[in-house]
Amino acid sequence: MGFIFFTCMLFFFFPGRSECVVNSQSEPEGYPIASDVQTTVQRTIMPGATPTTAISLREISKYEQYGYGDWTYGPGLPHDRRLDLMPKEYNSNGATQKTRLLNFFTISDIHITDKESPNQLIHLQNLHPESRYGSSLYSGVMLYTTHVLDAAIQTVNALHKQNPLDFGISLGDACNTSQYNELRWYIDVLDGKVIRPSSGAHLGAETIDYQKPYKAAGLDTSIPWYQTMGNHDHFWMGSFPLEHRLRKDLRQSYVSDDVFATGDLLSDPRKIGSRDYYMGVLDGSTPYGDVKYAGPVGDFKTQPKVAADPDRRSILRTEWMQEFFNTSSLPAGHGFDMPGAKDGFACYSFVPKPNVPLKMIVLDNTQRDDSGSLDIHGHGFLDAARWEWLKKELADGTAAGQLMVIASHIPISVEVTAPNSSMGWWTDPKNAVTLPDLLAELHSHPNLVLLMAGHRHLNTVKAFVSPDPAGAPENGFWQVETSSLHDFPQQFRTFEIFLNSDDTISIVTTNVDPAVLEGTPAAASRRYAIAAAQILKNMEGIEHWNPTNDPTVKPMPAGSYNAELVVPLSPAMREKLKNF
């Protein structure tokens, strides 16, 4: 929009502002990461003690003054060797990891955010300042979502040079609220394009660090990457379908110049039809992204407005899937096939290495847009088509003698540790399968070794022990969650799958902190994420998540959990893999 791209070399950094020199090139430079790239096995990020002076989440300018967001490096976190699925008499007898079958990474819940969009829910955090979910509505990390993804991808590239990766997969919630520009920023970061992380009037794009254009590094082109659909990728704010019977203007609100007004949805989702509070936007012209246009409607003499932007338009799930064909990285579609994309069917499978009998099953287990529910749409769900597809994929993999890994957005059985969770399995009649029946189906396939998920922004690992642990231990499987790049601990995971010398499988999963370089926007995001966890008192949940309700869920120091997950094999799979 008439903006001139400048190439800037970063010399000094202050919150919200960076000093640059301009050269004659037309393309902006990127933000490098630290040269010392390590995983949490070598060191961990340890938040400082929560300051005694209480401040609100919005008071970002006071974080440094009172010590919010401070952190240090702590000791590494070794892999916890887990034998939950093994029979009681199992003894490894010095078994070793004989053959590496696969090495890949997962990212999840990136929540690329257009902070200047008029239809967010920022003010709800102010109405519920004690809610541990408040950072999903507002926190300082909203300023830097593309920068954190860029730093994470550069960290992946560095790890790839140390230990080559076979592929990567995103477990959903690439976008925060299903906007076209959010999705394009996400794909363009992975493709290594120039990112212009502002919208509307592009306030502060020449002076404010989080608004300045920059060149993303892009994922190493030798690493294929795949995509899973999350609830935020096709619902407004991850919570409501765009065609809502209580609110007819949701889709129009994306491209409007009117700041969105609604009721207190955290108290009652049915208040979506109310117009009690303006929800606010972040001011891109301010160093800390000050909240403006938020508060009771009666406090405003006129309707607050922002510069409209057609690139903020909401996209249907079919359009969301089709956009993954508009990419310069591989594979085209990133797992989605064009016929499926046209129908909105976001499930597929692939074999990462043709010489290894292992199949990835990518499952869309988010709720349908037409479920008719007035509840928050964050539950696990399979309609009839997806349920039949999953059963066939599992049956085909079993018949073909393939190990199987399911990648989905929403984890299962979270009700065990989080009763009445808004992220539990949905019990609506339109859900084609109950949770007990789903578990029975999964347990009937001995080659299923792992279910991966995101959604809860946690690094929880859970064992699903076989219903017959003595007679058929191979009918158990593991569930591993990958935390968010949005909220602390802002990590991704690597997975290495080994065939062991005693004919078992080891899944070695490791948390990785993006190797952010001090003085860059991604480093500011880390401080803001830690500050949000401190202010909202989230550390207890991040580290423990009530493991007493489920003994297979272990504490997560500073939110991290590394593990070696041992899996028994069926006699047929032991025979098939004996020459590997």
Image (cartoon, rainbow, N blue to C red):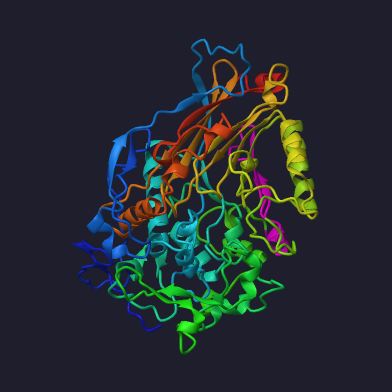
- Residue 23: % across, % down: 22, 71
Q: In front here: 129 or 411?
A: 129
Image check: 44 left or right of 316? left
Determine which quarter of the picture holds residue 374. Answer: bottom right
How many numbered discs? 0
Position of the N terminus, as image quadrant, is bottom left
User: Which of 571 and 248 lies nearest the eye of the viewer?
Assistant: 248
Highlighted range, magenta: 338-366
> Could you say where residue 104 lies in the image, as x and y percent from the top left?
50, 40
Residue 57, picture quadrant: bottom left
At x 41%, y 46%, the residue is 489
Is residue 186 found inside the magenta-colored segment of the image?
A: no
Q: Let me know if residue 365 is in the magenta part.
A: yes
Confirm whether residue 195 shows in the render.
Answer: yes
Res 85 quadrant in image: top right
Residue sitting farthest toward the bottom: 302
Query: Does residue 491 sit above or below 117 in this rendering?
Result: above
- In the image, 125: left or right of 52? right
Q: Position of residue 503 (x, y in %)?
A: 60, 18
Compared to residue 573, the image places residue 173 above or below, namely below
From this view, report whether residue 275 is shown above or below residue 37: below
Q: Is residue 396 among what the camera can see?
A: no
Image quarter hosting the C terminus:
top right
Foreground residue, 78 or 268? 268
Image coords of residue 81 (percent x, y): 49, 24
